[in-house]
Image: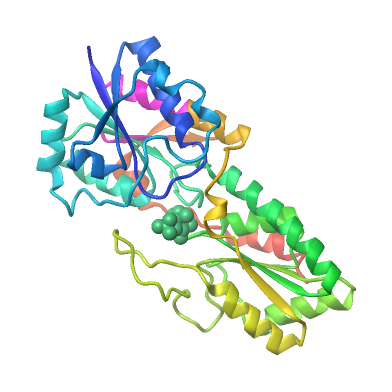
Amino acid sequence: MRRLGILTSGGDCPGVNAVIRGAVLAGDIVHGYGFVGFRDGWRGVLEQEVVPLPRHSVRGISRLGGTVLGTSRTNPLRNGGAGAVRECFRRNGLDGLIAIGGEGTLAAASELCRQGLHIIGVPKTIDNDLGATDYTFGFDSAVQTATEAMDRLRTTGESHHRCMVAEVMGRNAGWIALHAGMAAGAHAILVPEHPVSLEQVAAWVLSARDRGRAPLVVVAEAFAPMGQIAPYAPRGLDTFGRRRLGGIGRLLEEELQARTGIETRATILGHIQRGGEPTAFDRVLATRLGIAAVQLAADGRWGTMVALRGTDIIPVDLEQALGALKVVPEARYREAAVLFG
Ligand code: F6P
């Protein structure tokens, strides 16, 4: 029987389990593949921690948050490299691997493919910042969670006549901030792509207060106020050498209170946005990506990843996919900014 491995690596996100289910079911029904899963991403590959993934093991998992396989930010290129991965394929009799991950994971997968390994990528990030795909699964769920949280912040803000700051995730791009902020009717949305001055934010806050509203400011974790060159990142680097973000909301809390005189409270939503059940949209997208990934493996299209273009799932070359970051375009920001203040 032909066999494929599956792993989930990098930050988890709602919908990962639906990809696993889609791949295992379609692999079994359509192509006659058997599957094994690796525990905790590339760590499971390097340390040979393998679990069988028969069809019945994926029953009912598409509605579950997180990943049933576990994940880690282990970088295979730093910890044994292509040789160790090749040895793992050989021992487990694998034709190839489906790697579900974000930019770090897919970059590693691309390099391993360049060295001759058989890998298909499935893009995954709540940040929605991969240029090659219109939407990543997990984004819709994160936006839904962030919007619900902001609705709550607004009711307590109104009661106390306070300014509320909500900090959301988004390492390179402000998509979660833009969508959740618009959905919640925020008075200012701050994203890394479009620096604005603290004076401008304070002016929006005062204008909302002067109309009798409790101002809501939504900020993406990677936002840097105009004049500041780097985002707020006092927590060092992750295993892929990227800045660990988070905390700009607190800085805004102090600054806005000082500049406006309005009592201000910041809430950092953090990993709340990554946890919990996927929305129906994310379950459908993730299931379709899982089915398509197995089809690409069956067709021998190694070194590609599945992507959403319009309403179609298409294959994209991994190397090409990684070059392009999808940021919030100026026009989208300006459209939202019409309603600020
Ligand atoms: O890339 C996805 C993401 O959720 C970012 O938005 C965030 O900066 C990062 O992961 C957090 O990573 P960790 O779970 O390692 O703290």
Q: Nearer the viewer, residue 130 or 151?
A: 151
Residue 123: percent from the left, percent from the top? 41, 41
Relative to 46, is 159 on the left or the right? right
Looking at this view, name the residue that lies furthest to the right.
Answer: 212
Does the magenta segment cover residue 196? no
Please report the bounds of the magenta region as a residue range: 288-306
Q: Can residue 301 be seen in this view?
A: no
Relative to 314, is 185 on the left or the right? right
Please name the residue shown 24% across and 40% down the image.
44
Relative to 323, is 59 on the left or the right? right
Residue 17: percent from the left, percent from the top? 46, 32
Please tell me whether residue 21 is drawn above or below residue 83 in the rendered image: above
Does the magenta segment cover residue 304? yes
Please name the residue shown 69% across and 55% down the image.
149
Residue 244: percent from the left, percent from the top? 40, 66
Please tell me whether residue 147 is drawn above or below residue 339 in the rendered image: above
Q: Which of 228 and 290 is in front in this view?
A: 290
Q: How many marks?
A: 0
Quarter of the figure that contains the N terminus: top left
Residue 260: percent from the left, percent from the top? 75, 86
Q: Nearer the viewer, residue 331 or 237?
A: 237
Q: Can residue 117 be seen in this view?
A: yes
Please tell me whether residue 136 is drawn above or below residue 31 in the rendered image: below
Please name the residue shown 31% across and 11% down the image.
32
The quadrant where ligand 1 appears is: bottom left
Quarter of the figure that contains the C terminus: bottom right
Quadrant of residue 146 within the rendered picture: bottom right
